[in-house]
Image (spheres, grey):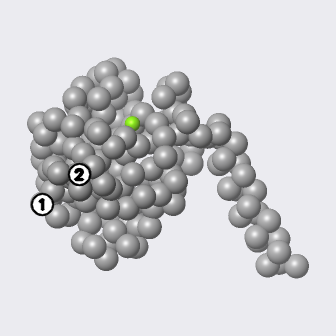
């Protein structure tokens, strides 16, 4: 019973997810939460880094569907912004919306991973469907998202410089 509340993998944020490992595990599709997973709860736009990340995983051949308990208007906005199919008003962990998302991906349950920040909606919901699950830290509870992102970018720049010198 309690195993259903345990994610298969944990990462601090979406950018840290090991896509190579997912491929090795036979994962072909990602059902991705919106609020606090790709966008802080209080924000209503996506940062370029998130758009780029989805482009990257699409480029690697993964199919993606957004799945959110949020209102249709907000969910449709992100669907359009990211050019991704989406299911809103999901009432996760209810199975119905997960099934809808699976149908949009057109994949078997073994080929799907759910990515989200909440144990009781994303992880429990995904596990009981037989999907793989990845937990990430909620964005709003961390230091401000952009600050972290900038630090990460700064880190990359410094590393490059060190290599150049
Ligand atoms: Mg969430």
Q: Residue 152 placed where, x, y %?
A: 68, 56
Give me the residue at 11% from left, 36% from top.
Answer: 96
Residue 147 at x, y percent in the picture: 70, 42
Picture quadrant of residue 107:
bottom left
Q: Is residue 113 above or below residue 93?
A: below
Which label lies toward us, 2 or 1?
2
Vertical position of residue 78 compared to residue 24: above or below: above
Crowd rating for badge 2 (residues with CA inside 10 Å; few <14, some 14–19, many 20+): few
Residue 28: image x %, image y %? Answer: 25, 64
User: Going 31% across and 77% down the picture, which residue do you hit?
Assistant: 24
The answer to whether the residue bearing label 1 lies less than 8 angstroms from the nearest atom of ligand 1 is no
Q: Which residue in the protein does label 2 denote? A: 2
Residue 108 - label: 1
Task: Of the two numbered discs 2 and 1 on the same chain, state the one appearing first in sequence.
Answer: 2
Element under label 2? helix
Looking at the image, which residue is at 71% across and 48% down? 150
User: Would residue 160 appear left or right of 122 to someone viewing this image?
Assistant: right
How far from the left and from the top, in percent, is residue 136?
45, 50
Q: What is the distance, in whole Å, between disc 2 and disc 1 at their CAs?
A: 24 Å
Find numbered disc 1 in the image and state the secondary structure of the residue it sits on: loop
- Residue in the image at 76% along x and 71% along y: 160
């Amino acid at each position: 019973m309690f195993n259903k509340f345990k994610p298969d993998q944990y990462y601090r944020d979406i950018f840290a997810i090991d896509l190579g490992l997912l491929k090795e595990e036979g994962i072909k599709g990602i059902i991705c939460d919106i609020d606090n997973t790709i966008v802080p709860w209080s924000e209503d736009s996506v940062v370029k880094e998130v758009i780029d990340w989805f482009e990257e995983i699409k480029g690697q051949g993964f199919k993606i569907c957004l799945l959110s308990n949020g209102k249709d208007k907000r969910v449709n906005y992100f669907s359009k912004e990211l050019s991704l199919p989406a299911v809103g008003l999901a009432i996760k962990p209810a199975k119905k919306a997960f099934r809808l998302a699976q149908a949009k991906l057109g994949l078997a349950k073994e080929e799907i991973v759910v990515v989200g920040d909440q144990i009781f909606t994303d992880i429990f919901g995904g596990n009981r469907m037989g999907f793989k699950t990845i937990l990430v830290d909620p964005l709003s509870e961390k230091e401000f998202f952009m600050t972290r992102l900038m630090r990460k970018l700064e880190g990359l720049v410094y590393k490059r410089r060190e290599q150049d010198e």
